[in-house]
Amino acid sequence: MEETTKKSLNFIEAIVEEDIKNGVNNGRVQTRFPPEPNGYLHIGHAKAICMDFGIAQKYNGVCNLRFDDTNPVKEDVEYVDSIMEDIKWLGYEWGNVYYASDYFQQLWDLAIRLIKEGKAYVDEQSAETIAQQKGTPTQPGIESPYRNRPIEENLELFNKMNSGEVPEGAMVLRAKIDMANPNMHFRDPIMYRVITSHPHHRTGFKWKAYPMYDYAHGQSDYFEGVTHSICTLEFVVHRPLYDWFIDQFKDSDYRPRQYEFNRLNITYTVMSKRKMLQLVREGLVAGWDDPRMPTICGLRRRGYTPESIHNFIDKIGYTKVEGTIDLGLLEHSIREDLKPKATRVCAIMDPVKLIITNYPEGQTETLTTENNPDNEAGGTREMIFGRELYIERGDFMEDAPKDFYRLTPNGREVRLKSAYIIRCTGVKKNSQGEIEEIYCEYDPETKSGTEGGNRKVKSTINWVEINSSIPAEVRLYDRLFAVEDPSASDQDFRELLNPDSLKIVNGCRIEGALKNAAPMEHFQFLKHGYFCVDKDSTPGHLIFNRTASLKDNWKK
């Protein structure tokens, strides 16, 4: 009997389907991805992107990109451009591009309306005093002495907040709601603050009073026609305030609804843009796209593919329970994606010269090898073979134990990959006793692809021909932090960085077939791992980043 399986809906998809069935908002589906342009996106944002854009795609809706640019102190056009690039790289297209700053005048007009209705007031207390007066969830707050000032006075002061007459931090506009409400967000939340020291990346110095997120976010959703405003779980407590602000102004049956899912936390990393910015500014990493960073551009530079990110997010799913995902699952996802795709090549990290003494001097031949045994369509490539080769120093042992099956001087034979069977006949050492050259003989009747090539030996080792191989710089990336949960430690997170998160290997030799490899091209270095060509590569100086090791430690 033929079995069919259907992927179960996540809880937000179930909500959307129920809304469509019941004709909520006329059955229309519109989402938005609303990043603040104050840093580069990370893997946690990728999860949100897949939700916001994926819901719109699945239900024939539209997802708009909206930049919540209400804080000019931290925002920059650089971040806007990078966010757009990351979304496109993940395979999504937005319906429209909006900015919260598009609505500054509308938000201002609505704030004036609240003041006139006696629902907002200008407070001249310091931020510290206002915070102290908030109380606790079980103790009511203390009302501001400015809470009941006359409406006309509030209007005059609010206009001064935006005229440049009020110093930065001297006044705020607060909503007048309920200082005894058990939800702390209802205790007269701040709607506007004054920022005069930084120009806005779009409006310059036109505005001096800027709206706060809790006020601007819901109204921007409403202005745009958003039906499902999907956020992470930390916004659950903000949702009643989101609804309260919308209820003050909505003039139709339409309204956006906020829904929340669990944010993404991964072991051995941090997801705070503030902490990542510290790492960048203090030179502890080589920029936002450092391959050790959890940023989307960092993962891209390391060699992660859009497909691997999507597969990872499909595996972890969306729930209402916070948790931390093992970094090994992300690494598993890229191995799973690259295993059938990446061309498998010989790269010798720690080369030692091997001389085949019975191979004719000055002679070379061309051998054929498959690009990927897991993919018949991957084709083949040619390798130059000759008398002098490089092999891995670790593939030879002079005084080898019985369970060492690679090259030794005891007469045991090994196969050179896609080539011939050889046996060691001697070595040459330098004055320090280090091996400089390994001598061997080959059996010309054992060429791979011929009848003699079927003769079995216990080990196959990798090699490159000395003259046709090319040098490369290899960057071995590992986990950025040495502890599983750096955010839970009492130590400064910068003291928890893994000192071995990057090792640079110079003098690596790789197959000459890779000399024209392009940035971001993927390879499996046999016995070493998955690598991609770094963007800093130049003609004659290839740089490879290790995407992931071959060993998969993640347990299903």
Image: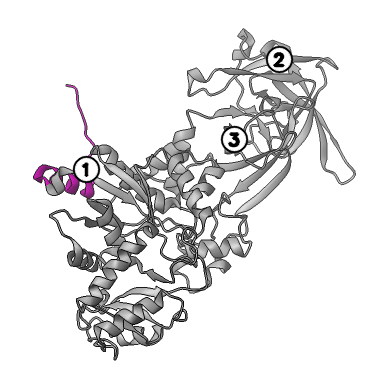
Which residue in the structure is indicated by mark 2? Answer: 366
Q: Residues within 10 Å of mark 2 (few under 14, many from 20)?
A: few
Q: Is residue 366 above or below residue 58?
A: above
Mark 3–mark 2 Cα distance, whole angstroms, equals 23 Å
Q: Is residue 408 above or below residue 326?
A: above
Task: Pinpoint residue 206: horizontal percent, then vertical percent.
Answer: 45, 66
Report the amino acid beneath label 1. Leu
Q: Residue at x 21, y 49 (%)?
A: 11
Task: Pinpoint residue 272: horizontal percent, then vertical percent.
Answer: 46, 62
Report the amino acid beneath label 2. Thr
Secondary element at tag 1: loop
Task: Give the label, 2 or 1, closer to the camera.
Answer: 1
Which residue in the structure is indicated by mark 1? Answer: 9
Magenta-highlighted residues: 1-23
Quarter of the image for residue 312 reads top left
Report the amino acid beneath label 3. Lys
Mark 1–mark 3 Cα distance, whole angstroms, equals 40 Å
Closer to us: 252 or 431 = 252
Q: Is residue 83 left or right of residue 63?
A: right
